[in-house]
């Protein structure tokens, strides 16, 4: 009898469940489509999207390439849907100019993303904080106190010394295969550590932490775009890994601050003390005690500022150098031309110094061409519109995320002859630069949210590349032709080589 009752209950309730499920599904789809399409608005072209996820499935492992494919089909300004979030994609100099110059103020904010929010003390870093008074204060502090011309020049000796360390390390290889990627990464890490902290940080634990930090900062969190699926981030371990990295980095920075505070007390008590060797933490602690403005430098603000230096300075710098050397190895003619220039200017000196760099026009062209093809931040850092606005005649709603595809713009055939070809000569006698005036070439971004550290990063790039090609000739192991070098990319916070750059370095005598 019970069996009969349960069977009848099943057959009577199943249609109800099916009908209810169908109604709920139709309601969800209807709400989703009605929220993403408004016939009264003139929206940019959009690719077909799926319910719930929108165009998330089209991003792939290399979003800069996937978005380039979409914009090639639909136009240089495209509106896609990432779960619940509309996102505008700009892939031409004209659309970039509209967003980064014409409407720069409206697009000056950042979306609040869960991973970077956790890693940067509630988005207190310069790079990820939303637009507003706080951001204006911390950026002003960085530009005037940490990245001024005078301050950048004060660290010249650090850059030259660490370049010499890298060159000497290669010399010890005695013609064996070396991991140039690892050496370049160590070089940039040492420069940043000495500038920021006053010492190197070569401990394996710190290197591992920095790698995890930069990887996580570039990770995609599905909960940011489909909130009711945020459990996926917890289940995958992404949330736990992020919290763990944030905690470890905080402990490291707390130790750094205590070390500097103790040192400062000792120096203040010493009548012969000197501030000539101040690092960035010293400068920030001095500003904290001076209280010359209404802006209070809380402890988390100082830690977020130092974290910015590591996140923005190490990975992007080493990546840019690595891609440039990779392209030089693949193009022996360009390598020989550059070596001829640096060796003539150096004229037998033991090492190229920063005084020599301004004379090296071909070196500057090589670096620009490498960054045109391999923008360190291919989609820059996403922005968010704060108001409704018209862009290129299209209606863009407040709260829309914005991706400027600097990688695709650097390869736009309407702006560049043979855009896929590595040809540094295109930048000789050419006023195009990466300082924000030429929208066809924006590896550092443009406008209010453009990178404030260009003048700090540039001499690091140039000094490293100039001395590497000055002192050594490079070849691939086992006499593999340079043109066969694997150039596969891997995307995280930055656009990196997937495989390490393994080379044989032969000292140049001449």
Image (cartoon, helix red, strand yellow):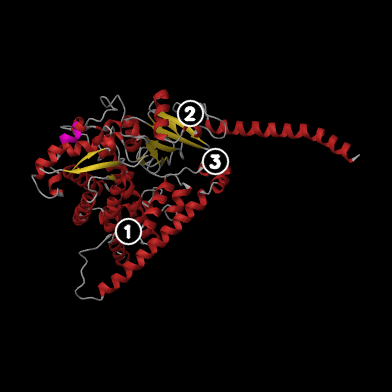
Question: Image quadrant for the C terminus?
Answer: top left
Give the side of residue 12 with respect to residue 283, left or right. right
Position in image of residue 297 (x %, y %): 36, 61
Earlier-in-chain disc, 3 versus 2: 2
**Main SS category, magenta section:** helix
User: In what element is the residue under mark 1?
Assistant: loop
Whether residue 30 appears in magenta in the rendering, the answer is no
Q: Which residue is mark 2?
A: 41
Q: Which mark is residue 504?
A: none
Does residue 323 lie above or below 77 as drawn? Answer: below
Earlier-in-chain disc, 1 versus 3: 1
Q: Which residue is mark 1?
A: 201
Q: Which mark is residue 226?
A: 3
Position in image of residue 121 (x %, y %): 43, 56
Q: Residue at x 48, y 28 (%)?
A: 41
C-alpha span from label 2 to label 1: 54 Å
């Amino acid at each position: 009898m019970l069996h009969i009752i349960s069977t009848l209950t099943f057959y009577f309730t199943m249609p109800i469940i099916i009908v209810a499920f169908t109604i709920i599904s139709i309601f969800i789809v209807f709400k989703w489509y009605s929220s993403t399409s408004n016939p009264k608005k003139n929206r940019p072209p959009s690719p077909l999207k799926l319910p719930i996820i929108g165009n998330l499935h089209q991003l792939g492992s290399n979003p800069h390439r996937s978005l380039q494919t979409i914009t090639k089909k639909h136009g240089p300004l495209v509106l896609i849907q990432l779960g619940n979030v509309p996102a505008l994609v700009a892939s031409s100099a004209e659309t970039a100019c509209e967003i980064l110059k014409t409407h720069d103020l409206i697009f000056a904010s950042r979306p609040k993303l869960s991973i970077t929010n956790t890693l940067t003390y509630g988005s207190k870093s310069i790079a990820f904080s939303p637009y507003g008074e706080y951001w204006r204060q911390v950026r002003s502090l960085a530009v005037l106190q940490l990245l001024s011309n005078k301050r950048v020049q004060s660290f010249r000796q650090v850059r030259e010394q660490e370049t010499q360390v890298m060159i000497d390390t290669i010399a010890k290889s005695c013609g064996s295969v070396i991991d140039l990627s690892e050496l370049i990464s160590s070089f940039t890490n040492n420069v940043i550590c000495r500038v920021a902290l006053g010492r190197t940080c070569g401990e394996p634990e710190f290197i591992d932490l920095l790698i995890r930090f930069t990887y996580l900062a570039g990770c995609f969190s599905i909960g940011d775009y489909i909130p009711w699926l945020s459990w996926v981030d917890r289940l995958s371990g992404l949330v736990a890994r992020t919290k763990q990295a944030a905690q470890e980095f905080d402990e490291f920075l707390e130790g750094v601050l205590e070390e500097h505070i103790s040192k400062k007390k000792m120096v203040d008590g010493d009548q012969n003390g000197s501030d000539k060797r101040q690092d960035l933490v010293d400068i920030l602690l001095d500003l904290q005690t001076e209280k010359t403005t209404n802006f209070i430098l809380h402890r988390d603000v100082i830690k977020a500022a130092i974290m910015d230096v590591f996140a923005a300075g190490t990975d992007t710098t080493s990546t840019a150098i690595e891609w440039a050397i990779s392209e030089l190895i693949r193009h022996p003619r360009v390598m020989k031309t550059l070596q001829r220039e640096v060796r003539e200017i150096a004229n037998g000196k033991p090492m190229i110094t920063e005084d020599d760099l301004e004379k090296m026009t071909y070196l500057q062209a090589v670096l620009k061409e490498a960054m045109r093809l391999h923008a360190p931040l291919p989609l820059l850092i996403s922005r968010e519109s704060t108001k409704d606005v018209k862009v290129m005649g299209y209606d863009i709603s407040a709260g829309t995320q914005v991706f400027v595809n600097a990688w695709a713009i650097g390869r736009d055939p309407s702006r560049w002859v043979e855009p896929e070809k590595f040809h540094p000569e295109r930048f000789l006698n050419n006023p195009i630069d990466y300082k924000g005036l030429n929208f066809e070439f924006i590896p550092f971004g443009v406008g209010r949210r453009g990178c404030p550290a260009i003048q700090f990063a540039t001499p690091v790039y140039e000094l490293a590349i100039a001395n590497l090609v000055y002192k050594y000739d490079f070849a691939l192991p086992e006499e593999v032709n340079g043109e066969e070098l694997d150039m596969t990319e891997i995307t995280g916070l930055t656009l990196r080589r997937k495989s390490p750059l393994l080379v044989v370095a032969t000292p140049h005598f001449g």
